[in-house]
Amino acid sequence: MHRFFALLLLSLTFVCCITLPAPAKAADAASAYAAAKKELESLKRDARRGALREPWERVVSRFDATVREHPRWANVPAAMFHGALAMEELASRSFRPADFEDAARRFERVAAGYTWHVLADDALLHAADIRGNRLGDAVASRKLLDTILTRYPSGDMADPARDLLAALSGAPGGDAPKAPVAVGRSGRLEQGDDVPGITATGDSARPSGSGVTVASASDGVPAPKTPAKAKKGTRSDPAKAAKLYAEARKELDAVRGDAKRAALREPWLRVMALYEGARDAAPEGELAPNAAYGMAVAQEELAARSWRKDDFLAAVTRYNEVVAAYPDDSLADDCMLRAARLRATRLDDADGAHQLLDAQLRRYPKGDMAGEARALLADLTAARITASVQPGPSGSAVPSGQSGKAASPAAPAPARAGKPAVLRQVSWRADNDRATITIELSRETEWRSQYAAPDNGAGRPPRLYIDFSDALPDDAVKPGAKVSGALLTRVRSDQPSSGHTRVILDFRALRRYKVQAVRNPYRVVIEVGATDAALPDGQRPDDSRVSVPVREADKAAPAMPPKDLVEQLGLTVHTVLIDAGHGGKDPGAMSNGIVERNLTLKMARMVGERLRRMGFSVIYTRDRDVFVPLDKRTAFANDKKADLFLSLHVNANNDPRICGFETYYLDLARSDSATRVAARENAVSEKSLSDLQFILTDLMLNAKTQESRDVANFVQDSALGRLRRDGFPAHDNGVRSAPFYVLMGARMPSVLVELGYCTNPDEARRLNSEKYLSTLADGIAEGVSTYKRKLARFSQ
């Protein structure tokens, strides 16, 4: 008997030893979990890394490893939940159904395996949101929501579950609701760890306690924020306010995404009415400032489409009402800045804008909008000084507010001593609908542009003046020239005062125009369109917006901020033109069994197939082995109104050790290697030295440099990330600029991808591998998709 009890005691001791986790193992689990959470939060804040797939997959794998290596750790449910969150973040960027399915299943595993855990109902709500809003399975979503209400009727996810269930009630069968419903915060604590606030995919919010800040006029309506203090005794209906606010946000997103509805007045009025109802339902509640701000934003967006003065005035009034009603709210200074911008850029009221900005800086000197307010105030002050004595067409002073003239402020350059800048030459290219004039100078100098409306009585056509305050024309520059059979009819230069040079441009018609400075060499480029379609991103002659001074030429940009363009034009990427480099009589690079014309055609089809699956419309410059002249390729893209031009090539070098993947955008080369690559790819062109000026003009007119640089970065990062994740030794040669003929003349963002060096034996073997090419095609397509999502974020 004693032996029996001894054996039993020994067995129990052994079982305890193998089942109870050692303190050291628990510490390891906690450390691994904390590191994974830290990486997840870092990745959320890093837009560049967050646009790639590989970092998200790495975070998911870290949470999975924690669960796999420490299955009996007390916080396993939290690790699983955060792994699901990371996958949901990835899915919100990739928009792949498989990624959303993976995220939903992960949340469902948490809820099924740990029904007792505080995160179980959170996991169910996330899974229901994904199934209903992302995967279109309303039936499965309802089942999950019913489980929340049955299993956790008093939990803090019950109310959001009811809201989502109500939204799904109008979605019969497996149809998804029209707009997603936000998943609310859990606000609870895990065992020994805090659960971060959870936000629905696509919404933006700050951590609790910091409020919501709108960084600029390019941002949309914020998510609910830290509430203002409510007055005691105020009767309100917070539930109704929350419901109307959510409906207003959904309706706003829906209108923004529908170009036909956005062109009408009624949908915007409906959005404003919903926000107004949310505000009035709980005027002192936490959502009231946001709802009032939403009314003002919707009014501004309506005004941006109607171009009616009374609509812009109404937007200013609404912003001022937010400030008056909620002066202590974090949105108050945002409203004052937006109202000031509207006064300055839409209503030609610089004095009113000055007053608003002065008041903003007095009230909120340390607010997060103070820097932008000071910058706008400085711009307005510079414009006022410059326009105080405005030279007219004949050199006489003209009051700055005279009807029919809209002036852009000077572009101040650093003060320079010594000789004035030299106006080296004026060149142009024009047809019936569009004209581009390039004014080249020896260095940066102050300049300003001014529009003069046509005067039929005086026989004056539409005219632009470009004034340089410290520049003299070169002796070789002719005083004037007439242009026949084109939109541009006459070009002249004049010197109305000492050290001052004016270029006068006459046009047959002028609907839109754009003036900007470019560096290397320094020049001012003027683009004019006879129709809205010819230059959709240019400003109208009757638009009195104040341009941002060009302090540095390489930062020169159109006066209108990018989001403003996206809002008004609904810019996105629908059609991608894929250009398979070389072809026919032009074989391109050949080495180690690779012929460039064949490989680029194969790769073009692979990338095109993936883009089509992602929802893009794809066209090709060539779909068989034929020769297509370089200038015909971009002309074809322009004719087909493509939104993106993607040219694929294979590189070569006399040094067989050189290898790597690189992406180019159109600009002047900055390195010897970029110059060499451009020279090789340009060799088939029939251009001669006499075309140099036209080439330079095309380079400045159509380069879309910033947009193309963005596309190039996304393609480079996505492709390299894909290759490295699949174990390929890809060498990153980076994003570069070079003057490729094949990219010149494109009226859309355009990039040239060098897939690798066929002269490097190892890289040539990889380029002959189907798996390598498939992975590379996946990465390139993902880069294009990421750029499209970047544009979409501007309008969210």
Image (tube, helix red, strand yellow):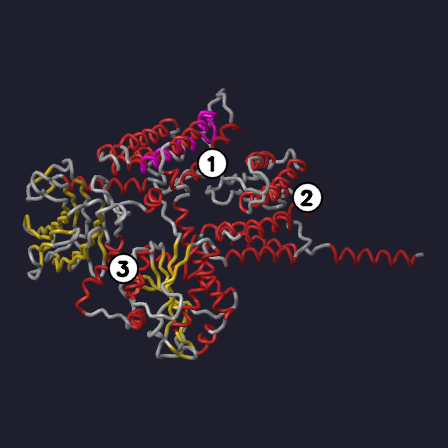
Q: CA distance from mark 3 to mark 1?
A: 46 Å
Which numbered tag is attached to residue 113?
none
Q: Amino acid at mark 1?
A: Pro
Seen from this angle, which residue lies furthest right? Answer: 1
Mark 1 neighbour class, 10 Å CA radius: few under 14, some 14 to 19, many 20 or more: many
Q: Secondary structure at mark 3?
A: loop
Magenta segment includes 309: no
In this view, the residue in front, 4 or 523, is 523
On the rendered image, what quadrant is the N terminus found in? bottom right
How many marks the image carries: the answer is 3
Magenta segment includes 279: yes
> Could you tell me residue 269's position as x and y percent?
39, 30
Dominant secondary-structure state across the stretch colored magenta: helix
Q: Earlier in the sequence, mark 3 or mark 1?
A: 1
Q: Amino acid at mark 3?
A: Gly
* Above or below 654: residue 709: above
**Residue tagged 1:** 224
Q: Secondary structure at mark 1?
A: loop
**Residue tagged 2:** 115
In this view, the residue in front, 162 or 139, is 139
Contact (CB < 8 A) between labels 3 and 1? no
* Residue range (magenta): 277-305
